[in-house]
Amino acid sequence: GPPGMPNVPNAGQQRIDSASIPRPVTVNDAGVVEFATRGAGVPCNPPPAASRYAVRDRGNAGPRYLRPTLSQIPFSTDLASQSGQPVALMVCPLALPEPDDDALPVVDMGDAGPVRCGRCKAYVNPFMRFMASGKTFVCNFCGHTNATPDAYFCHLGPDGQRRDVYERPELFRGSVEFAATKEYMLRPPMPNAHFFVLEATPGAVASGALASAAACVSKALSALPCPERALVGVATFDAAVQFYGPRPGGAPPSMLVMSDVAEPFVPDSAPVVVPLTPDNLAALQALLEQVPKMFGPGGGRGNDSCGGAAVEAAVAAMERTGGKVHAFVATLPTVGVHALKLRDAAGVGEKDKLTVLAGQDSSMKALAQRAADLQVCVDVSLMGQGYMDVATWSELTGSTGGTLYQYSPFAPALDHDQVLNDLKWNLARPQGLEAIMRVRCSSGLEVNGYQGAFFAAVANATDVYLPAIDCDKAVLTHVRYTDKLSPGADCYMQAALLYSTVDGQRRIRVHTIALPVVDSVSAVFKGADLDAQALVLTRRIAATLPNGTLATVRESVTSSIVTTLHAYRKHCAAQSSAVQLILPEALKLLPLYALSMLKGPALRDGARPDERSAWVASAHALACARVSPLLYARLLSIRAPLEAGVVGDVMPEGLPLSSEKLEQGGVYLLENGAVALLHIDRSAPSQLVEALTGAPSHDDLQKVPGGVVLARSDAPASRALQDLLVKVRIHRSSFGRLRVTRKGDPHEAAFFTALVEDRSAAGMSYVEYLCQVHRLIQIKMN
C-alpha cells in the first residue's frame, strides 16, 4: 500500500498474522510527551487522549479542552461525505490539566468586560487581526471590522502585530478565562449548596449501605471546598422522608417527617438547608453518626422506599439557592411519585425493542427539567443488591449535569473506599455552577446540535444550559456546512462557557482553535482523530440504543467504520492489491475500537439492562480521555514487580487484550479507569497469593465468603500492589473499584470478556472481525 499505511496482508485468506495487526501503543510512564498546539504555527494531530502529555498552548486550545474529529477540515460538505468521517468537536471546557501543562491565564478587563466582535459576539482571540494602526480589528469568525475600544488600543509594531501582544494572554493563548462583569449575571453567583439524601430502609440498613453512606457524607462535609460559602442539608428516607433541622447550641437536630410521598414538599417549620458553620457541621456529623442506630434493623418498619419522592423533595429544598443533590439509593423505589417497577428481563432478543433502556415513564424527565430550571444538579449513587433501574435514574443525572455512580451489588468491605473517594472527588474536582455554553464556528460552518449531560429544552438550541459541569464531562458539538470554505485558509471554532466558580466568582472560559482547510480526501485522513471519532460513535450508540434494537445498533457500528475505511480505500489507496486490507494510519485502530463496542456492556448478548444503561450513561457524558480506556482497557503483567516488591517509576508494559498473552503462574491487572480486575493464575506461587489476599493458597482463595478483600500487610508484594494501584488512580484521576477474580465468578467472566481480541461468547476475534470488515469493503468497492 501507500507509504506509511499499515497493511494487513491477505485479509481475504484468513491468514492474518495476529502479531502484525494494529494495536494501541501501550502507555507506560516512561516519559510525558510535550505537545505544542500549533507547532511552527500549524496545528498537528494531538497525542492519544488517554496518554501522558504536557500541553504547550501556542494559540490553539489544547486537546483536553477541544478535540476535533479532524484536525484538517474538508472545504465542502461533499468532500466531508466523500471522506466518510464526521465533522464534530469534543468540548470539555473545564478539563483537568496535567501538572506540566501551561497554566490557564485569568484575564480581568475591568468594568468593560472582555472584548468581543460587535456582530457575532465572538470573544477576542489570537486570530483576530488588528488593522488601521491598531484602531480596528477584523473578526476571524464573521469578518466584521470592529473599532478597537479606547481602553484596549495599542500601536502595531513593524510586523503588523500589536506591540503588547505577549503581555495579553487572550492574544496569544488558545485558552483563557475572563472575569465576568455584572451584565453576565442574572443574580449574584449561587452559594456552594449541597443536599444529601440517604436511604434508611431495612434493606439499606442490612446491606451496610446506610452506614457506609452516612460515614462518607460525614467525612466529605469536613473536606467541603469553600465552607464559608457552603449551605448543607441532610435527609433520610424509608416509606417517608425525614428532614433534619440543626438547632443552635449543639442540641440534637429536630426531625421533620414528610409522609405525603405522592406530592412531596419541604416542611417549613424549621430550616432544612443551613450554613456550614462549625456548630452546624458538628451537629450534622453527630446526626450522621446516629443515623444508622436510629434506623435499626427492627422497629416493625416495612420495606417500602420512597426514593424518587425523597429526591424530588430535596430538589424542592434547593429551590431558592440551586446547588447539588447527592442521593444514596439502596433499593428500587416502591411508593410515592417516581416509584419504579421491576423490569429486569435479562433475555432480550437481538430484534426486540430496548424499552428497558429508556426511563419507565415521563415523570423522571419532568423532575429533571424542573431541577435544571432551578439550577439543581442531581448525583445518584446506586448501592443496591439487584436491579436498580439505572435507565430511569440516569435520565435525572444525565439531564442536570450530574453523575450516576453504580455500586451494585454493594458490599461495604469492597466498596466503601470507592464511595468515599468518588464523593470527595465529586466535591473537590474542578467544576462550574449555573453554566451556559455556546460554540461558534467561522463563516461557512455552523453548529448542528450538541450531545451530552444537559437538559435540551429545545432541539438544536444554540446554547447548552448546565446546572453544573465538571472536569470529567464533555459536550459533543456537531458541525455542518452553510457554504464552501477556502482551501489553504483556516477555519475557526470557539467554545465559551459562562459559569460560577465554587468560591463565588462569575467567569467566562474561552477556548479557540484554528484548523486548516484542505481540498483532498487524503489530507482529511491525515488529520483524522481516532479518539474523537470513537467518541462520536459511542455517543451515537448511547443516543440510539434506548428504544432501539441490538441488531440495528450493532449493524450501524460496523457500517459506520466500513464507510470510513471504504472511503480511504477508494480515494487514497485505489492502486493497492485487493487482497490487502489497507487502513489509514490515523484510524488504523478503528476496527479494534468498533469490535470493543460490539463486545462491550452496551451491545453484547446477555448483558443485564442496568449494565447496558450504566455504559450508556457514561458514554453520554464523558470526555475522550475517559471513553477510550473504556473501549480498550489496559492489561498489565505485574508478577515480576510484585515479587521484586517495588513498582519503580515506570509502569509495567501494557499487553494486547488477548489470552495468548497470559502466562501460567502470572498475575495481571486489567483496568479501564472505571473498574480494575486482579487476575491471579491458578499456578501462581502460594506465598504471593497469601501476600496479596491473605488466603494461604489459590484453593483457599476460592472458599473466601463474599468478595476477596486485598490484604493490606507490610509484605513487599502487598505494598507494591498498593503503590501500583495509587499510580493507576492518579493517572486516571479515578478510584476504579477493584475486584479479585475467582474461578467461575462474574469477575472472572468480566476479565475474559474484556480480552476483546479473543473469540468469545461476546463475539468474533479481532482477526475474524478484520476479515469481515475487509469483505464488506470489497463488496462496496465492487
Image: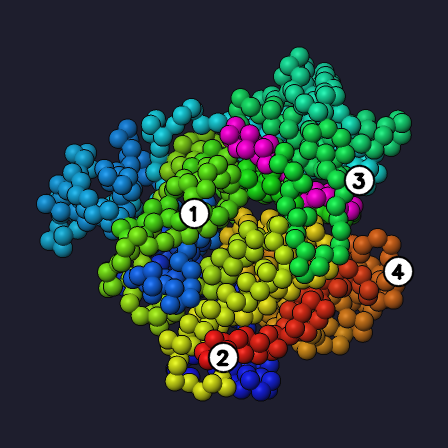
Q: Is residue 713 visible?
A: no
Q: Which residue is mark 1?
A: 449
Tell me if residue 543 comes above or below residue 696 in the rendering.
above
Determine which residue is flagged by label 4.
Answer: 703
Colour mode of the rendering: rainbow
Q: Secondary structure at mark 1?
A: strand
Count of marks, rendered view: 4
Circle 3 sits on which residue?
208
Write the start and end of the magenta stretch as one range.
Answer: 365-390
Locate residue 589 relative to residue 607 in the image: left or right: left
Would residue 730 appear left or right of 750 to someone viewing this image?
left
Residue 778 - label: 2
Residue positioned 19% across, 44% down in the render: 144
Residue 9 pos. (x, y %): 52, 85
Which mark lies nearer to you, 2 or 4?
Answer: 2
What is the secondary structure assignment of the residue under circle 3?
loop
* First in residue order: circle 3 vs circle 4: 3
Q: Earlier in the sequence, mark 2 or mark 4?
A: 4
Q: Residues within 10 Å of mark 4 (few under 14, many from 20)?
A: few
- Residue visible at 44% across and 40% down in the picture: 464
Seen in the picture, residue 196 relative to 525 is either above or below; the reply is: above
**Distance (Cα) linking label 1 and label 4:** 53 Å
Image location of residue 751, percent across then percent down: 71, 64
